[in-house]
Every structure is written in C-alpha cells, then in structure tokens.
C-alpha cells in the first residue's frame, strides 16, 4: 500500500466513511446524539482510542501471533477505553452519568476493531495513526450532524443554550430525543450520503 | 396497582423481565447490537439463530459478570478494571460455549455455531453487563434482567428479519436500499415500542 497520508485521510473521512459507507459503530452513534455536549465527549473518546489503538497494534503487528490476535487487539483497545473512561469520570461527572455505559461500549465499537484488523495490522505506525484519526473524524462528523438536528428539534437548545425559536413558535418534538428519532435521523443521513456517493461514481 | 400483588418477589421478577424485554429494549431503546442487526437480519432463519445465541450468552455472561464484579473486583477495590474483566469473561464464555455445543450437539453447532464468534463483539452483551451495574439488583434479579435483555433483542431482530424478508422484492431508490431503509424500519418499530414506556417503574 503506497498511499500518502492525505489520500488515506480523505478516503476514510468520506469515501469509506465508517458510519454510512461501512455501517460500523452505529450503536453508540445513536445513543449519545440527543445532546451535542455528550456527542462531543463521545467523539473525543472514540478518536483518542482509535489513534492510540491503531498505533499500538501497528507497532506490535509483527509480534502478535496470528491465532490470538483478536483477543490481543481487544485487550489493547480495552486498556485505552479504560483511560478514556477514567478521564471523563474525573473531569466531567455530570456527563459521565449519561454516557458512562456507552464509553465502556467503545470497546465493542466495530470501527475500532475494524480499523485494527483491516489497517493497523498490516501498515506502519505513523500511517495507522492517520488512518485512526481519519476514521474517528469521519465517525464524529456524522454524529455531530445527527446531534445538530436532534438537540434543537427535541429540546429547543444547542449545546445547552436555549435557542430563541423555542420561546416564540417552536414546539419541541420530544420524539427527536427519544430513540426513534435517532433511528430516523441516521436512516435519512445514510440515505442522503449514499445517494450522493453513488451518483458521483464512488460505488463500493 | 395493588400493593399486595406488587410486593411479592415473584411479581418483582416478572416486572424486571418485562421491563428488560420491552420498555427498556436493549436494541430499540438502548441502541445496542446494531451492527449485527444490520448485517444479519435479512432472513428470518439466520435472525432466529443469532437471536437464540444472544439470549443464551447474555443470560450466562451477566450472571458470571455479576459474581466476578461483586465478589472479586469490589472487595479488592479494582472496579476500574471492570471493562477489561468483562470483555475477557465474555470472550472466554463464548469460546467455552462454542466448544461445549460442538461436542454435545452437532446439529445445534451448525445452526448456532457460526454466530458465536460474532457475539463476542456484539455490544448488546457487554451493554447488559454494564447497565446491570447501575441497578440495585441481587443475583437472581440480574439473571432475570440478563435473560430479559436477550429476549428483547431476540424479539427485535425477529421482527426486523421478517420485515426485511418481505421487502426483498420491493423496488427502492439506490441510496435507500440496504442499511438506510433498515434504520428507518427500526425507527418505526422503536416508535411502537415507546408505547410500552411508562407502563412499569422500578
């Protein structure tokens, strides 16, 4: 693979976007997107875990025996998730109360295992970090897009700030902050993004 | 509700089961196990196999994790190791179950066995173990909660599998086919399931 870091980045953010193209890591993308702040913390956690686990796995790729590589990868990922878990708990206990279990679930977020298996286990450390960062950014973009719709429509606020429309004419759509709203939003975004990439010839 | 009935332990267990399976459905209200749903739910029979495997593994691992967390990690003050411990226990349990099934029943192994490796990275399993920590449950409650969570996931994947099988023939716009329409279907089912919420408060 002789791709420049820039190509890898673009490919992971848009053409091979983990959420709407490869359909990975959906679980957590839905649960935390009803408030923008929760989403940002979650995205930070995922990007950090992706970069660090890709880096570590890539460094160790020649030393991990093939047969047990899955369990080794899970352990490496789990140790970084533990760091994220402790850091969020220490710095922002309020947000941790909402997203706590979902932070733990970053371990089973398919994006991270997927990137470790598909990229980090056969590339050099530096480019693996780029790949991790790009996949994380691609994931975060979708999450933030969903949160930007769900929070204003559901609560009439944005990152906790009350929007003027809430006082004047907007009736909150409670459905948007409940689970169905998340499924609808992600479905619509996937539909939109897929029809865009498909018409421009980016067929996977 | 009648306090005489609601106070009996058996009724509490029933409530925990119903709330885990319906009002707090692990897929439709907690969003867990989506990856396998999108990948596998296009046919009823595979949905059934994976669903059954998840019910079984969730029930077993939630019990083991409860014991390990409360009797090993908490006394030693090692709560922060819970993520690593849980994931190892889940992986080991799945491996063990796979070996046992392979020996005991050939037919069961062929219908269920291929789904077991998928389960290790299914977030529903780890999710049930993590959510259980937030609830004041004892061992028996946990076992029921784990089973209920698995059953809820099973119901959801069966519904989605059935709808997708029927939809196979329909013509869809290119971008909508596949995951997008599945997500919208799940949204509609989740909408129906929110009708259950508020029914039970524990």
Image (tube, coloured by chain):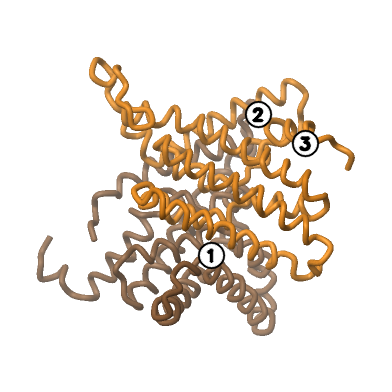
Which chain letter goes with mark 1? B
The residue where tag 1 is placed is B54
Secondary element under disc 1, as helix, strand or loop, is helix
Q: Are marks 1 and 3 on the same chain?
A: no
The residue where tag 3 is placed is A8
Q: Quick one: label 2 or label 3, which is nearer the N terminus?
A: 3
Q: Are marks 2 and 1 on the same chain?
A: no
Q: CA distance from mark 2 to mark 3?
A: 20 Å
- Residue A157 picture location, percent across and down: 33, 28
Which of the two residues, B22 or B96, is positioned nearer the viewer here? B96
Which chain letter goes with mark 3? A
Q: Residue furthest right?
A: A2
Label 1: few (<14), some or many (≥20) within 10 Å?
Answer: many
Relative to residue A24, is residue A188 drawn left or right?
A: left
Q: CB of mark 2 within 8 Å of CB of mark 1?
A: no
- Residue A93 picture location, percent across and down: 36, 51
Q: Are marks 2 and 3 on the same chain?
A: yes
Q: CA distance from mark 2 to mark 1?
A: 31 Å
Q: Residue furthest front?
A: A91
Which chain letter goes with mark 2? A
Residue at image location 34% in from the left, 65% down from the top: B17
Relative to residue B86, is residue A115 drawn left or right?
A: right
Residue at image location 35% in from the left, 63% down from the top: B134
Quarter holding the N terminus of chain A is top right
Which chain is rendered orange in the image? A
Label 2: few (<14), some or many (≥20) within 10 Å?
Answer: many
Q: CB of mark 1 within 8 Å of CB of mark 3?
A: no
The residue where tag 2 is placed is A194
Q: CB of mark 2 within 8 Å of CB of mark 3?
A: no
Secondary element under disc 2, as helix, strand or loop, is helix
**Image quarter of residue B106:** bottom right
């Amino acid at each position: 693979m002789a791709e420049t870091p820039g190509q890898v980045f673009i490919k992971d953010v848009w053409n091979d976007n983990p959420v709407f193209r490869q359909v990975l890591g959906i679980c957590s993308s839905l649960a935390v997107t009803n408030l923008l702040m929760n989403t940002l913390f979650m995205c930070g956690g995922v990007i950090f875990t992706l970069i660090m686990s890709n880096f570590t796995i890539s460094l160790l790729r020649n030393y991990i025996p093939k047969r047990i590589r899955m369990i080794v990868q899970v352990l490496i990922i789990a140790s970084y998730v533990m760091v994220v878990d402790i850091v969020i708990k220490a710095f922002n206990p309020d947000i941790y109360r909402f997203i706590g279990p979902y932070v733990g679930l970053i371990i089973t977020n398919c994006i991270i295992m997927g990137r470790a298996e598909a990229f980090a286990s056969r590339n050099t450390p530096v480019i693996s970090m780029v790949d991790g960062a790009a996949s994380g950014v691609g994931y975060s973009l979708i999450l933030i897009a969903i949160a930007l719709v769900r929070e204003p429509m559901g609560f009439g606020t944005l990152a906790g700030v009350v929007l003027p429309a809430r006082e004047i004419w907007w009736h909150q759509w409670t459905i948007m902050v409940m689970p169905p709203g998340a499924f609808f939003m992600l479905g619509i975004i996937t539909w939109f993004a897929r029809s865009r990439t498909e018409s421009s010839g980016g067929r996977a | 509700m009648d306090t005489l009935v609601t106070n009996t332990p058996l009724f509490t267990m029933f409530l925990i089961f119903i709330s885990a399976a319906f009002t707090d459905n692990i897929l439709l209200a907690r969003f867990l196990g989506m990856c396998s749903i999108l990948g596998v739910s296009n046919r009823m029979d595979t949905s059934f196999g994976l669903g059954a495997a998840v019910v079984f593994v969730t029930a077993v691992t939630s019990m083991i994790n409860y014991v390990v967390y409360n009797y090993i990690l908490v006394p030693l003050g090692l709560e922060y190791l819970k993520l690593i411990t849980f994931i190892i226990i889940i992986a080991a349990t799945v491996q063990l179950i796979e070996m046992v099934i392979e020996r005991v029943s050939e037919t069961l192994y062929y219908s269920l066995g291929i789904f077991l490796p998928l389960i290790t990275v299914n977030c529903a399993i780890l999710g049930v173990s993590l959510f259980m920590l937030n609830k004041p449950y004892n061992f028996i409650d946990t076992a029921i909660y784990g089973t209920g969570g698995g059953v809820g996931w099973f119901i959801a994947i069966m519904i989605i599998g059935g709808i997708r099988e029927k939809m196979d023939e329909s013509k869809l716009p290119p971008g909508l086919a596949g995951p997008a329409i599945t997500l919208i279907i799940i949204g509609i089912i989740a909408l129906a399931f929110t009708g259950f919420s508020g029914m039970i408060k524990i």
